[in-house]
Image: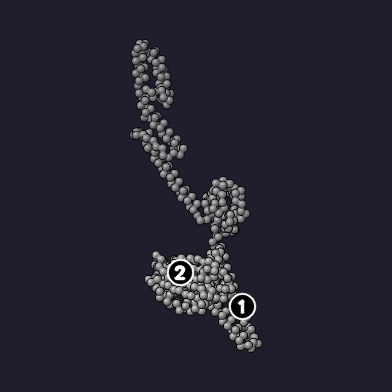
Amino acid sequence: MKTLFTKPIFPYVIGILLLIISTGIVLSQVIENYIVLIAVLLIEYIILMLLLLSIFDKYIKPIKKVTKTVDKIVKGNYRARIHHTGNSNVGELTHKINTLARNLSELSMNEQMQSEQLSTVFDNTESGLVLIDEKGYIHLVNRKFVSMFGKSQKEYKGYLYYDVLDNEIIHQTVQKTFLYEKNVKEAFTHFEGVDKYYLEIVGAPIFNERNMLKGAVLVLYDITELKKLELMRKDFVANVSHELKTPITSIKGFSETLLDGSMSDEIAIREFLGIIYNESHRLQLLIEDLLTLSRLEKEDFHLILTEVDMSSLVSELKPVIVHKAEQRKLELSIHVDENSILMADSERVKQIFINLLDNAINYTPEKGKISLVVSTAGDFIEIMVKDSGIGIEQEALSRIFERFYRVDKARSRNTGGTGLGLAIVKHIVEVHEGDIKIESEVNQGTTVYVYLPKQKQD
Ligand SMILES: Nc1ncnc2c1ncn2[C@@H]1O[C@H](COP(=O)(O)OP(=O)(O)O)[C@@H](O)[C@H]1O
Ligand SMILES: [Mg+2]
């Protein structure tokens, strides 16, 4: 009975009452007996009410439910469903609306996934990206861009590009992209705090299906590493030329004097020839070192791996080392652990020993001590070369492996050094996937540790 007075059905009840009143008025002209009249009207009322309730339950109620659910779906709640188990037409309708909601839900999930994937790609690209619309408003900037230019993504989004980006080249790139409607490429340096970036910027226009300009995307490539490599290459060429120039100048000068023919002093002539010989020997050493380096750096360089027994390798080198140490009146001790065996390129490993021992001998004053110890350390073979020589200052230690870097140029030259010895050692260690460490104290001595893996992984 309560349903009769609830809102949705109330107007229909009123309608029925009005219908009964009007039937009552009409029938009162025909039926004179009031009791019969009331009975007829009561029966009519009951029949109509039963009819109304049945129609309400079957059609109106479910349609109200459907409307409510559709409202939720319209508002974006694709998980809303109608629970109605009728087999009527309304049942079919609810079933179809549920299917529609399910499809919408799948569609929105797919869309969400796609946009997540897109933003993941966008955010994790190694280049800075900025999306600008045709009016110049920034729509998107990615994480890399923020790391290059500071601020947060929010501080760019929705702003005009020239209000939030204070780089003239970027402004020009955007303007040119919009003006010429084609890709524009520029390069510039950018400072963020203490960091200096070399950046390349490409502006690419975006068109809609009707070929109308809709905006532009800016791609910023960080070419700092590339620039550094380029600078290093230029430095290297300059250094090589400089290193070659000195001996060649002196060879040329002395041979000119000799060719002049005016020298008669046998001793002086021999002295000049000696200088020419020494300088050409230095040139030879330098060129050999340069060739070694370039061979090690070749793309297709590969090691010739064999089983190397350190004891026999060291005994092969021993006579030369002993001779050099004796010449410089140095005390030399050598110890190689038995079973110091590894898979390595024996010629390269020899080069490590020669370069390190040469340094130890050259940079240790007379009566100093030098020791070489080869031992096993876990999966590695440790080579330790220790001297009691002049040592290296702390500031110079980090640069010691750079090509042509020498703490004392004159001293290195006098001992036949090229400034490439340690660079070569480091390279050899790296291609063997090993490690190198150096410890030094001025006037106390230097110790170099090299670790080479016993088994090199391919
Ligand atoms: N054992 C050492 N003691 C002191 N200084 C060293 C030692 N080894 C290397 N150095 C310093 O490192 C520089 C670079 O070494 P290296 O690459 O072998 O070139 P170089 O041809 O000059 O020996 C040397 O010029 C020297 O100043
Ligand atoms: Mg050297």
The C terminus is located in which quarter? Answer: bottom left
The image shows residue 233, relative to residue 321, as above or below, that is above
Q: Count how many numbered circles sit on residues in the image.
A: 2
Q: Quadrant of the N terminus?
A: top left
Name the residue at the right extreme: 262
Figure check: 203 above or below 242:
above
Question: Which residue bears the numbered disc 1?
Answer: 249
As drawn, the label of residue 265 is: none
Observer able to see residue 182:
no
- Residue visible at 57% across and 65% down in the picture: 231
The image quarter containing residue 184 is: bottom right
Identify which residue, 54 or 203, lies in the foreground: 203
Name the spot of residue 132 as percent of width and height, x first.
Answer: 56, 50
The percent position of residue 59, horizontal first and vertical second, equals: 38, 30
Q: Which residue is mark 2?
A: 384
The residues tagged by marks 1 and 2 sit, at their Cα atoms, a distance apart of: 39 Å
